[in-house]
Amino acid sequence: MIYLKLSEENFEYDVRGLLTSFYPGAEIVLGEKEELLPGDRCLRVDHGNGEIRVRLLTGTGEKEAFAPADTSDRKTAKSVLKRLVYGLLSEDTGKKLPWGTLTGIRPTKIPMAMLEEGASEEAITSYMEETYLTGREKIGLSIEIAKREREVLRNIDYEEGYSLYIGIPFCPTTCLYCSFTSYPISRWAPRMEEYLAALFREIDDVKRAFDHKKLNAVYIGGGTPTTLAPDQLDRLLTKVEESFDFSHLQEWTVEAGRPDSVTEEKLRVLKAHPVSRISINPQTMKAETLRLIGRKHSPEQIEEAYGMARAAGLDNINMDLILGLPEETIEDVRFTMEKLYAMAPDSITVHSLAVKRAARLNTMKELYAHLKFENTGEMMDLTADYCRRLGLDPYYLYRQKNMAGNFENVGYAKAGKEGIYNILIMEEKQTIVALGAGSISKRVYPDGRIERSENVKDVSQYIARIGEMIERKRVLLED
């Protein structure tokens, strides 16, 4: 048990992030306890008199650290606080975190901003080492990715352009770790026409509101868009194509993530439209793990779906995998990478397992407490090595709370095959208009301010309240 006592509650999120990283799986509660049980910890943070003081109490003693800080400047105070907490927790556990005190999900925004201001790589490295205690390997990775992102996005119009996300929140089954808005297609197939009708109303309204803007990227995700029947998929793609001006379009992605949703007919539909990029996502090539996480397809079906996509003429295929899946070892990861190496996709996205609050792994954790979840630096390095050998270099990166091993998600791609939308959603430099149940639109203002509008997650509510969803977006996006 970890007890946390803060004199300034507005730093709770940041301190919790570090505690979770150093003590994965531990329960964190606010408050103090006079007598600690073996293994318990109590972290106390005090602000005042121009300094921040941090104490870590255990059953056998306590350690303290303090430093001067202008507590009226939140950004400066937070930075000092996190370094103090990091030092005590690192000493207590014997661990060093690869990203140091960085707990945010977009670490590449730091080198990106500094590069745009003309800073050298040496200056960026020094700043991230001193300010965030980040390791040099991760700093180097973030700089490499930031430089590539700048190149990929060089022709994106941030002020007059926008990107479009369309959510199809249905899947063959729900994976054990999934927290996305996703519903079983077997139950919702009878109401799919109602869903598409509501979605088409949203498309019509965005068409009217944005007919003077430049559409740069379209991403149809989910869920699994290829759970739609071929004629439904065709009508959706046709609706998008007929509704928007594609003269400035640089990418159109459709997720075909679940191999058991992919057919030759659906692939022909994708090829008949100007879809430029698809995803077929194994997550792992180990049959036992696929069954354990709730995927009802075999490794052979993954290879079959990939082969069909290549035969259909699709020439930009991404494949996702997840490190830290239950009971998987480095040899299992090597086996998966050997299979992907033989298929040679155009991009590979390597995710570190992050168990979200709504996932079954969390809501039903007592059923899975016996399972071992492990991600290591060796696993991350192994996937990076295979990707580099395939000619895939890192192009985007993001982090999540509760990630296995406190690592990151990295997208690797051949030159010219990068996922443009993936970068845009992470860097938050362009307005993204999002349609469908559970989607979130983000308006980015010239001064960097961001405002959001969320669609309800429940499909029935989305259908019934589509007028309200349209009005919400209209208020957000109107000039």
Image (tube, rainbow, N blue to C red):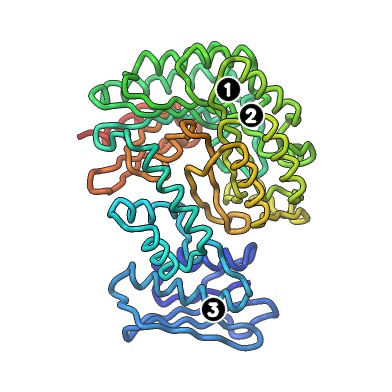
Q: Which mark is residue 193?
A: none
| Three-letter amino acid code of the residue under disc 2 | Arg
Mark 3 packing: few (<14 Cα in 10 Å), some, or many (20+)?
A: some
Horizontal and vertical percent position of residue 254: 51, 25
* Mark closer to the chain start, 1 or 3: 3
Q: Quadrant of the C terminus?
A: top left
Q: Residue at x 64, y 31 (%)?
A: 344
Q: Quadrant of residue 231?
A: top right
Q: Residue at x 51, y 52 (%)?
A: 399
Describe the element under mark 1 as helix, strand or loop.
Answer: helix
Q: Residue at x 36, y 37 (%)?
A: 153
Q: Are marks 1 and 2 in contact (CB under 8 Å)?
A: yes
| Three-letter amino acid code of the residue under disc 3 | Leu
Describe the element under mark 2 as helix, strand or loop.
Answer: loop
Mark 2 packing: few (<14 Cα in 10 Å), some, or many (20+)?
A: many
Describe the element under mark 3 as helix, strand or loop.
Answer: helix
The residue carrying mark 2 is 258
In the picture shown, does residue 18 fall above or below 472? below
The residue carrying mark 3 is 88
Q: Residue at x 37, y 20 (%)?
A: 201
Mark 1 packing: few (<14 Cα in 10 Å), some, or many (20+)?
A: many
Task: Give the label, 1 or 3, closer to the camera.
Answer: 3
Q: Are marks 1 and 3 in contact (CB under 8 Å)?
A: no
In the picture shown, does residue 202 fall above or below 14? above
* Mark closer to the chain start, 1 or 2: 1
Horizontal and vertical percent position of residue 342: 70, 31
Which residue sits furthest bottom? 61
Q: Nearer the viewer, residue 282 or 434?
A: 282
**261 with respect to 471 (left or right):** right
Q: Which mark is residue 226?
A: 1
